[in-house]
Structure formats: structure tokens, C-alpha cells
Amino acid sequence: MDEVTIIGGGLAGVEAAHFLANHRVKVKLYEMRPFVQTGAHRTPFLAELVCSNSLKSNNIDNACGLLKEELRKLDSICIKTADENSVPSGQALSVDRDLFSRKIDEIIRQNPYISVINEEVTTIPDGVVIIATGPLTSPALLSNLVSLTGKEHQHFYDASAPLVEKSSLDMKILYKKDRYDKGDGSYLNAPMSKEQYDKFYNELIKAKKAMTHDFDVPLFEACKPIEEIARSGYDALRFGPMKPKGLWRDKNDRSYAVVQLRKEDNYEKLYNLVGFQTNLTYSEQKRVFSLIPGLENAKFVRYGLMHKNIYLNSPSILNEDLSLKANNKIIIAGQLAGVEGYVESMSMGLLAGVNALFKLRKKPMILPPTETMIGSLFNYLHLGSKDHFQPMNANFQILRNYDKNKKDSVIHNAICAILKYKEEIDE
């Protein structure tokens, strides 16, 4: 029977495994946790979400919303499970992190075509292999990859936000509201006067960081630490993660800044501070973030942290199907291949499964259509700049012949194209 080895049980790895198992391919899925930890993960479960519980907008006219809809058409296990374990989050798709990863772990482990092996892989085995170890790839495996490709890896830093217990928040100060009242009113909001903002800002920019060295690589913009945003200018937070516009409590309220908190679980016990990714020391997070009105006595159940994200220079080392030029039986998937974001990682994992299936069965490769968001991301990994390659989020500008004046038509064409692609790969 056909067999594929997948290294890495994150979002990309489980997508590839699930697709292959659905096409009656035996899968050995290696995940080194919990025996070897990454420093960022907290649980032993597959597909753990590290930085946030949000999968971004669900609106189909949003680039990530369109990508999610394409994945639904392709029977993505991660998006299906996210939909089933969502928590109220306005127009975004946010999930109960614990329930999400537990359910995926259960589905994958119970699949008769998938064997989950909890151990670290340091050398790449023979046969068709998908490497989906993500941005926290172990040093030993990374060294093996570098030796094979002759190319050094690249990296950037990103960060995660802290979580607080709702029971420790002052609900006399906080209020529920979505920006411009678009959504289900599920966010908590902490209003700030100018005096409160000034004190918070001044303490934030002088707070002690957890890492003392200067960054010699980029900070990924979408996960830039809030203290770094603040250092770029006094008003940067007020036009960024603490923007008050559309969040005022009523028509007479003109708060100078507003901090939003988003549900972390279905029981409304935990909330995360939206946009508050940080690299401050734990004690400084407690001190500075407790200056936010309503959070004076907040109990932090997890502090924010920063970690190094590794990725490969895919245009230099990968073939059109994302297999290595040095060994075309090895396929690189997910964030390691150079996409950034949860949903983007899922999508490249699913396509890695598709490509592995066609490789096993010696069928001509069917590339995803470039009219689609998933196809455009896939295309970027092969055709991006070799000299200045950077991780890519879903965005409409990478779509072939995108015309913002014909957005509805672009979205319609993308959905039609992905349905046709689904029929072709399932034949």
C-alpha cells in the first residue's frame, strides 16, 4: 500500500495527513511534542494554536476569508473543526483553542490510515516525505535540511499576546461592543482617557524586554510587539491596536484609546488582549498591562512571549510542486515553506498532501488555479523573489489579474475555480 511520512503535527501536517488518509494512503505522522518541547507550545495535542485563537475574518470579501471558504470547498479538517469549535468573535472566526486541538488530535489518532508517532525526527527518511515542522523546526532537522539544500534558513521574530481570567476583570468599567457594531457584541472593551493613555504609553515604552539582544532580522508586521509599535510614535497605538474609532460606548463617549479583549474559550472564562503581542518580561507585563482600566487586578493565566520563526527560501530550493530540487520526494509544507498565518499554513499543508498523492501514483501534477487565493499563495512560493524572499499572508494583490473594481467577480471566479480543482484532484 502507498505510504507517506509526514514530519510535524501542526496545522499543515494534519491537513496533509487527513487529505492522504481520505484517499486511502497510509501515513506515518511524526510529532516530537510532548517529549521535545518548542518553548512556545503548551499542550501535547496536534494542531495547537500558539499565537492567537483567531483565524481572522470570515467575510468572503476579505482575503483570508476567501482562503477559508476555498478550504471549506476542499474539505479542510482544520477549518471544519474551527467552525465546529468557534467562539463569538464578531466577523472573525475565532476558536476555543483547547477544544480545537483536542478534537483534531482525536480525529487524526482514530483514523485507521494514520499512525501518530511521538518522537523527534533528526534525519529525513526515504520515500515520499512531507516536512511540515513549521517555524519552530528543531535544530537537528533544520541542520539536515540545510545540508541537503545547500541553503541557509531564514528567520524573523513574532510574538503572542497574554491571556487573562474574565473573573478578575472589572466589568463595571469594561463593556461589550464590536467595532461599528458589526458583529455579535462579543468583545470586551477597556476605555482610556488621555491621562490614562499617557501614563500607559510612558510606562510601556520604558518597560524591560525579555530579550536583550538587538534584532538583526525583521519583526513580522502582523505580530509586531505592542511596545515596538509604541516606540514608533505617540499616536501609533491610537491608530493601531488601541484605535477608539467605532468602539465608543455611546454617542457621548469620546475615549482617547480603547483596548479590546477577545474570548479565548466557549465558557467565557479566558480573554486575550487583542493586538498586545509582546516581548516584555512577565513582571513588566503584569505591571504595565494592569494600568489598563478594568485590568487593575487582572489574573494572567498566560503571558505573551516572542519566538524565532524559521522559514526556507522556497523560490531558490523548491520545484513547482514544492518538492526539493535536491530530492523531489521531499515536499515542504506550511509556514516552513514561507507562508505566514494559521490559515495560510493549513492551505499549504493540504496542497502538500495533494502533491504527495500525485507523486505516489505517478500522475501528472495538477496545480491549483492562480485565480484562487490558495493557488496564488502556492504560486508565490515558487515564483517569489529569490534575493528578497519574505513570508506571505493571503492578500488580494497576489491574485492573478486582480481588479479591485471587480471584486465580486474575482471572488466568484475563485470559488468556481476551486470547485473545479476539487473535482480534478478527487478523480
Image (cartoon, rainbow, N blue to C red):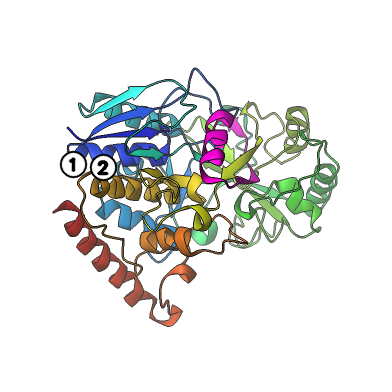
Task: Identify residue type, mark 1.
Answer: His
Which residue has dot 2 on it? 19
Count of numbered marks: 2
- On screen, 256 above or below 265? below
Q: Name the residue rendered at 24%, 43% in the picture.
A: 360
Q: Nearer the viewer, residue 55 or 235?
A: 55
Which residue has dot 1 on it? 23
Residue 407 lies left or right of residue 241; in this view the side is: left
Categorize mark 1 by other alpha carbons within 10 Å: few (<14), some (14-19), many (20+): some
Question: Would residue 324 be seen by someone viewing this image from the given angle?
Answer: yes
Q: Name the residue rendered at 75%, 49% in the picture.
A: 228
- Based on the picture, tell me whether residue 351 belongs to the magenta stretch: no
Task: Identify residue type, mark 2.
Answer: Phe
Categorize mark 2 by other alpha carbons within 10 Å: few (<14), some (14-19), many (20+): many
Q: Position of residue 427 (x, y in %)?
A: 13, 54
Q: Quadrant of the N terminus?
A: top left
The answer to whether the residues at label 1 and label 2 have Cβ atoms under 8 Å apart is: yes
Looking at the rendered structure, the secondary structure element under dot 2 is helix
Q: Position of residue 112 (x, y in %)?
A: 20, 26
- On screen, 308 above or below 385? above
Residue 226 lies left or right of residue 365; in this view the side is: right
Question: Over which residues does the magenta segment extend?
Answer: 136-165
Mark sitting on residue 371: none
Q: Position of residue 241 (x, y in %)?
A: 65, 53
Q: Position of residue 293 (x, y in %)?
A: 71, 41
